[in-house]
Image: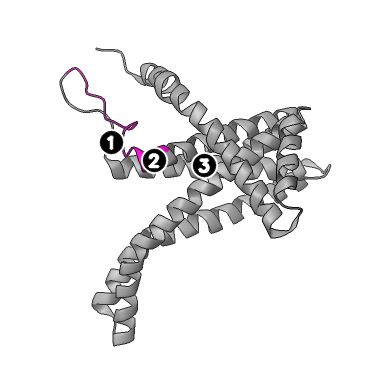
Amino acid sequence: MLFLLPAALILGALAPWLITPILMIGGLYLCFEGAEKVLESFFPHAHHAETPNTDGATLGQSEEDRRVKSAIQTDFILSAEIMAIALSVLPSSTLFEQAVTLAVVAIGITALVYGAVALIVKADDIGVYLAQNGRFGLTRGFGRGIVRAMPYLLKALKIIGTAAMLLVGGGILLHGLEHLGLHGPMHMLHEITGHIAHGGFWGWLGESSLTALVGLVVGLLVVPVVIYLIAPLAKRFRRKPAA
């Protein structure tokens, strides 16, 4: 948040027209992450294969480190998206008022998002501690229940998180295109949804499903670009010159 808050204030003061393109870039990243997770469920580790170096050793990190790094990147992008959205909907106000509002948003993001993530990550340890050290049978049973439930909870969260990334990413892209004057995709979405259901829960479900499908299609198109073009270029720039 130390980076996001000043960056958001500078952006709002000097280049507010950049907010929508930046949101759309973040939306592309969320679509990529969501599509990557969908691909991974069908082809585990196929596009995360470790690359051997000239000595035959493997580059890349362990699976756990890779997942942690990916989660941190995704959380950072989501936080940046929330900050940009908050900035875009703020009415005309002074720089001080914007700073206070964005600071409140930043604190809320930190407390809710990262607090929830930390609690989920440590839930296994909490369950084991309660199961082994609880004073009462009910407490120990509760701890064992947490340990047994965590694999199912993590699977459910993975599915929900993937769907949410595709939904949010697709929605940001559609609204961004509409904001830039390209109303066709959003109009088509409303037309198709209108044929499925008129308002209510089913209308919302239909629109959300189509928006997530847009995010998935865009993400699938972005995945090969990232894997075969952007990632190799990034590795080449990060590679240190030989001594």
Say if residue 68 shows up in the picture: yes
Q: Residues within 10 Å of mark 2 (few under 14, many from 20)?
A: few
Q: Which residue in the structure is indicated by mark 2?
A: 69
Decide which of tag 3 and tag 2 comes sooner along the chain: 2
Seen at 61% across and 38% down, the residue is: 170
Task: Report the span colored magenta.
Answer: 39-54
Say if residue 5 shows up in the picture: no
In magenta segment, residue 47: yes
In magenta segment, residue 220: no
Location of residue 115 in the rendering, given as x and y in whole percent from the top left corner: 49, 58
Badges 1 and 3: C-beta atoms under 8 Å apart? no
Q: Which residue in the structure is indicated by mark 3?
A: 76
Location of residue 164 in the rendering, given as x and y in whole percent from the top left corner: 55, 48
View extreme (right): residue: 92
Q: Amino acid at mark 1?
A: Gln
Q: Which image quadrant for residue 99?
A: top right
